[in-house]
Image: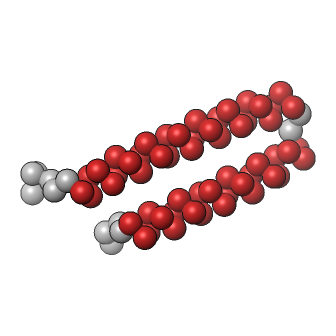
Amino acid sequence: MPTTMSTMSSSVSECESHANLVKKLTKAYYRDDQQVKFMDLQAEVDSLLAQLQSLKSEQVETPSDEE
């Protein structure tokens, strides 16, 4: 099944909702130093996800010459 922009948008929304839920839950379970490390990792994951989605959208916009 091909990936559409609406599918990617819903995936982004789900990831953002999941990230917000994780942030709320982890505040209760981690010490401050662990929370800082976790939030740094979460920010890195968010950044990598944005880069991946950008690359995927470029692929969708640019037709492939390999076909």
Q: How is the image coloured?
A: secondary structure
Q: Which quadrant of the rendered structure holds the C terminus?
A: bottom left
Q: Residue at x 67, y 32 (%)?
A: 40
Total labels drawn: 0
Q: Taking 36 as reference, is 14 above or below it?
A: below
Q: Nearer the viewer, residue 57 or 18?
A: 57
User: What residue is rendered at 59% in x and 57% in y?
Assistant: 15
Left or right position of 11 against 30: left
Q: Nearer the viewer, residue 31 or 61?
A: 61
Q: Is residue 41 left or right of residue 49?
A: right
User: On the rendered structure, is 58 left or right of 65?
Assistant: right
**Relative vertical location of residue 45 with respect to residue 19 in this rendering, above or below:** above
Q: In the rendering, at what x and y percent does residue 51 appear?
A: 43, 42
| Residue 2 place in picture, x, y as percent | 31, 69
Query: Horizontally, is 50 left or right of 2 in the view?
Result: right
Give the residue at the far top of this rendering.
33
Image quarter of the N terminus: bottom left
Compare residues 61 and 37 and report the one nearer the observer.
61
Tell me the quarter of the picture where residue 61 sits: bottom left
- The residue shown at (57%, 41%) is 45
For the point 81% across and 52% down, the residue is 24
Image position, residue 9 (x, y; %): 48, 64
Q: Residue 23 location in percent, x, y?
A: 76, 48
